[in-house]
């Protein structure tokens, strides 16, 4: 997809998270996901409900996700089996269409990359609910693209294969951020990264990205920007549009000046008639 960066924008690329970033938190998708993970752990490992919930929290803390933890611990688990269970039953109808989002995303002049830990099926369903075409993005970095090694058959005679298969690459790992930067092909400090997770923002900042924490009014220490909602992007990070914003403002100012001049003309005409 062709793109043209504004001359005076500090950014050459924008990385956008999906869940709770392109749509607001509080949809109930997050709690439903946790319930589904717990149910998966109960069904797959035969755990009691309270142990399943504590294991989920522990694996998120130690390995970044339940799936990553289970694979690292040696469970024979294919990502598709996990994702179809925990994502396949989510209440997607709670993600409301956002009529303004497609135009907002289209208006971003830089290279746009969707950067999500979610699998492709979830990404497609969430985008469909939002009314955003996948083609709106120049590229996608998702679970499958960060973890191609998990989708090839392991060879028994390859000593390195089993070790590779135990590693799941997800934000906020360095490998995940590097995967996005490779796809972006841009200088990290000219790449803007929007995400609702403070962990992910911290990781991005450590690797030199410009960062925007979404869904928060107040910046975390590592966030260059904070915006309460993606809908505030133009207002809160006008630098994305650089010269384009100046031109828009100039156009707006011209319109405003013309309108004021018309008002003044009417007053002058009225006074000359009255005089
Ligand atoms: Mg998110």
Image (cartoon, rainbow, N blue to C red):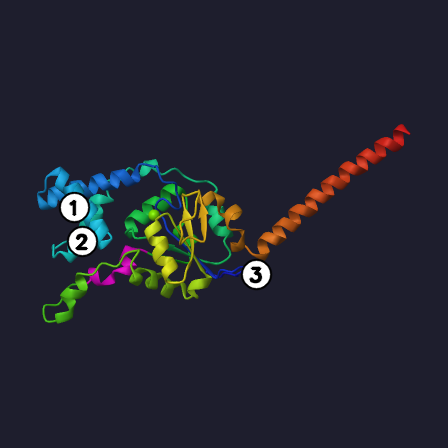
Position above or below: 209 against 252: below
Classify 10 Å Cα crowding around label 2: few (below 14), some (14-19), many (20 and above).
Answer: many
Magenta span contains residue 2: no
Classify 10 Å Cα crowding around label 1: few (below 14), some (14-19), many (20 and above).
Answer: some
Describe the element under mark 3 as helix, strand or loop: loop
Residue to which mark 2 is pinned: 69
The answer to which of marks 2 and 1 sits earlier in the sequence is: 1
Q: Quadrant of the C terminus?
A: top right
Q: Residue at x 29, y 63 (%)?
A: 175
Count of numbered circles in the view: 3
Residue to which mark 3 is pinned: 8
Position above or below: 113 against 128: below
Describe the element under mark 1 as helix, strand or loop: helix
> Mark 2 touching mark 3, by CB under 8 A?
no
Q: Nearer the viewer, residue 221 or 267?
A: 221
Residue to which mark 1 is pinned: 55
Q: CA distance from mark 2 to mark 1?
A: 9 Å
The answer to which of marks 2 and 3 sits earlier in the sequence is: 3
Q: Position of residue 215 (x, y in %)?
A: 40, 43
């Amino acid at each position: 997809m062709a793109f043209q960066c504004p001359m005076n924008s500090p950014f050459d690329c924008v990385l956008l998270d999906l869940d709770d970033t392109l749509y607001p938190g509080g949809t109930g998708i997050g709690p439903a996901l946790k319930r589904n993970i717990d149910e998966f752990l109960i069904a797959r490992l035969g755990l009691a409900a309270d142990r399943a919930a504590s294991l989920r929290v522990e694996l998120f803390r130690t390995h970044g996700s339940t799936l990553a933890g289970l694979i690292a611990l040696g469970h024979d688990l294919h990502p598709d089996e996990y994702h179809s269970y925990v994502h396949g039953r989510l209440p997607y109808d709670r993600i409301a269409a956002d009529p303004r989002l497609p135009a907002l995303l289209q208006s971003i002049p830089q290279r746009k990359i969707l950067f999500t830990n979610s699998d492709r099926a979830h990404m497609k369903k969430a985008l469909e609910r939002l009314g955003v075409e996948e083609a709106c993005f120049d590229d996608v970095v998702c679970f499958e693209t960060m973890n191609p090694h998990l989708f090839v058959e392991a060879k028994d005679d390859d000593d390195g294969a089993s070790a590779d298969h135990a590693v799941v690459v997800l934000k906020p790992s360095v490998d995940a951020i590097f995967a996005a930067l490779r796809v972006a092909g841009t200088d990290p400090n000219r790449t803007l990264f929007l995400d609702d997770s403070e962990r992910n923002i911290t990781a991005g900042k450590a690797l030199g990205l410009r960062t925007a924490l979404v869904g928060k009014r107040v910046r975390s220490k590592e966030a260059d920007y904070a915006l309460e909602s993606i809908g505030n992007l133009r207002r809160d990070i006008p630098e994305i549009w650089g010269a384009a914003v100046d031109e828009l403002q100039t156009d707006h100012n011209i319109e405003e000046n013309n309108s004021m001049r018309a008002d003044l003309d009417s007053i002058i005409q009225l006074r000359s008639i009255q005089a």
